[in-house]
Structure formats: C-alpha cells, structure tokens
C-alpha cells in the first residue's frame, strides 16, 4: 500500500515516471534490468533480500542507476553501509513527497542526498567498533541459541565464540549477547 501510494505521488510529478515496482528485495535487479530506471528507490526492510543488499547488487549490475534508500530506520550504520555500497541518497519515510521528488532530481543531477539529521548522527556515532569476526558471531547469534550451536554453525571452537562474544559485548557496553545484538542493530551495525 505504501509503495503504491509513493508511486502515485511520484507519478503526479511532471518529470518523474515510475517504470517498475517490486515487493521483494530479490526482485530488484531483474526489474531494474528490464526497465532501466535512472533512479531506484529502495526500502531497507524488504522480504527476500534487504534493500541494502539489493542496493549493493544493483550498483554492480546497473552502475548508471542512482540508488536512493527510503526508510523508517534512520540508523547511522545503515546510512554508512548504504553510502559505502553506492547509494546516492538516504532519506527517511517521514519526509514530504515534495522532498522525495526533489531528492530524485538531485540524485539524477549527480548529487548525494542525505537526511541532514541522520548525517549528523552518523558522523557523531562513528564506524562500528566490531571486527569482521565479532560482527559475524553477533549476526549468527540472532539465529543460534547456544554457544555450541554458534560454534558449529561458524566452524569455530566454543572458546573462540565466547571470546568474540565477550569482546563484542565489552565494545558495545552490553551485559549479555542479546543486549549486544540489540545495541548493534539499533546503531545499524548488524
């Protein structure tokens, strides 16, 4: 419903035409390859593949297509990941439709378009303090209940998993791994 409403609002703009819509992240690249849009507007939370993952794949498949991330999840880590993945912009869904249309025009003109409040938060937050392995262990801990399960899934020893979890919890000032996962997710680092 939201996607359809956005498409209708954008189609009211005299210089903007919506050429494709998809409901799943794993449909983005195929739809873009068929329609060859100037701009792709993606949400972060999409079934099949996240908008951030779809943006990464789309940037490789159609480098001329400008990517804008539109989301309710204004997390600094998401902004950083989107920009590192080639997105031309990152906007929050609560922005007026006129701002979205302006952002699309600015992206086509080659500008980077970022919500100013989110940009300030991203700069003050900094990069994730987690090492790639700590990130991997925390990410996997969302799906695996025990250290033994984690160790088996990641092909690590239980002691190594505990060490990575302990280090991640310390860096995130978390009392346990569930809190560490929550903190990392809130900051957009997972």
Image: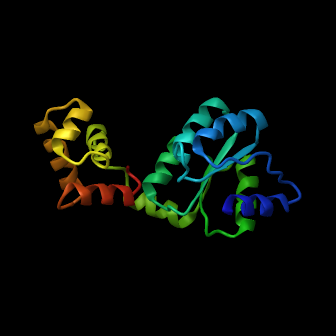
Residue 146: x %, y % from top left: 18, 46
The structure residue drawn at horizontal position 80% and vertical position 61%, both measured from the top left corner, is: 8
Question: Of residues 109 and 134, which is closer to you in this image?
Answer: 134
Is residue 187 at least partly visible in the picture?
yes
**Left-right relation of 154 to 18:** left
Residue 80: x %, y % from top left: 47, 50
As drawn, the residue found furthest toward the right would be: 14
The structure residue drawn at horizontal position 76% and vertical position 58%, both measured from the top left corner, is: 7
Residue 83: x %, y % from top left: 53, 46
The structure residue drawn at horizontal position 19% and vertical position 43%, both measured from the top left corner, is: 164
As drawn, the residue found furthest toward the left would be: 159
Question: Of residues 165 and 148, which is closer to you in this image?
Answer: 148
Residue 125: x %, y % from top left: 38, 59
Question: Of residues 186 and 7, which is closer to you in this image?
Answer: 7
Say above or below: 6 vs 112: below
Say above or below: 88 vs 75: above
State which quadrant residue 160 falls in.
Answer: top left
The structure residue drawn at horizontal position 71% and vertical position 38%, both measured from the top left corner, is: 31
Q: How many marks?
A: 0
The way the protein has been coloured in the rendering is rainbow
Q: Quadrant of the N terminus?
A: bottom right
Question: Of residues 30 and 93, which is closer to you in this image?
Answer: 30
Say above or below: 92 vs 61: below
**Left-right relation of 55 to 169:** right
Is residue 64 at least partly visible in the picture?
no
């Amino acid at each position: 419903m939201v996607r359809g409403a956005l498409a209708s609002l954008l189609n009211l703009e005299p210089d903007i035409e919506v050429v494709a819509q998809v409901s799943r992240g794993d449909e983005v690249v195929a739809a873009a390859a068929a329609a060859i849009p100037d701009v792709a507007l993606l949400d972060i939370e999409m079934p099949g593949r996240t908008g951030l993952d779809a943006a990464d794949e789309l940037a490789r498949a159609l480098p001329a297509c400008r990517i804008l991330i539109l989301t309710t999840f204004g997390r600094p880590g998401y902004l950083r990941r989107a920009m590192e993945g080639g997105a031309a912009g990152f906007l929050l869904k609560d922005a007026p439709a006129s701002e979205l249309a302006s952002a699309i025009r600015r992206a086509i003109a080659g500008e980077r378009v970022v919500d100013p409040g989110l940009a300030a938060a991203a700069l003050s937050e900094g990069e994730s303090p987690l090492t790639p392995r700590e990130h991997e262990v925390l990410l996997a801990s969302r799906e695996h209940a025990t250290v033994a399960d984690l160790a088996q899934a990641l092909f690590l020893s239980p002691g190594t998993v505990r060490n990575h979890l302990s280090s991640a919890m310390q860096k995130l000032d978390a009392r346990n791994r569930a809190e560490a996962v929550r903190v990392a997710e809130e900051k957009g680092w997972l």
